[in-house]
Image (cartoon, grey):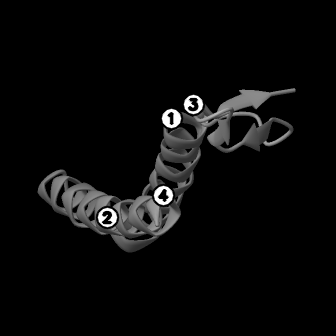
Amino acid sequence: MRRYLVIFLAILFSIALFFLTKFILQKLTKNDTVFISSLISLIGFCLFILIGFLYLEGNTFDPSYSYSPPSIVDGKVKDGNFSK
């Protein structure tokens, strides 16, 4: 679910960046405003995706860990734990 959120936010960010760049370049009266805005928007999209995935997925646990669920031993509950 987080990956879809990152992709959605990156799309919104790149669209906003496109229009902001186009507006600024039109105020400066540049000729290739759409091309430059598209290029900056694509670069911004890629950077946002990369930073978003690295930030959100960098703190996940190692999938090589195995989990043993809680169990009952001699009438007492033994806690579950992760082990390598």
Find disc 3 in the rendering and name its residue: 76
Find disc 4 in the rendering and name its residue: 45
- Whichever of callouts 1 and 4 sits on the residue coming sooner in the sequence is 4
Question: Alpha-carbon distance for marks 1 and 3?
Answer: 40 Å
In the rendered structure, which amino acid carries the disc numbered 1? Tyr
> In the visual, does 19 lie left or right of 6?
left
In the rendered structure, which amino acid carries the disc numbered 3? Lys
Q: In this rendering, which labeled residue sits more in front, label 4 or label 3?
A: 3
In the rendered structure, which amino acid carries the disc numbered 4? Phe
Q: As rendered, which of 61 and 17 lies closer to the eye?
A: 61
Question: Alpha-carbon distance for marks 2 and 3?
Answer: 62 Å
Question: Alpha-carbon distance for marks 4 and 2?
Answer: 10 Å
Name the residue at the left extreme.
27
Find disc 1 in the rendering and name its residue: 55
Label 4 element class = helix
Name the residue at the front extreme.
74
Question: Alpha-carbon distance for marks 1 and 4?
Answer: 15 Å
> In the visual, does 13 lie left or right of 35?
left
Quadrant location of residue 9? bottom left
Q: Is label 2 in contact with label 3 (beta carbons under 8 Å)?
A: no
Q: Which mark is residue 18?
A: 2
Q: In this rendering, which labeled residue sits more in front, label 2 or label 1?
A: 1
Q: In this rendering, which labeled residue sits more in front, label 4 or label 2?
A: 4
- Whichever of callouts 2 and 1 sits on the residue coming sooner in the sequence is 2
Question: Alpha-carbon distance for marks 4 and 3?
Answer: 54 Å
- Whichever of callouts 4 and 2 sits on the residue coming sooner in the sequence is 2
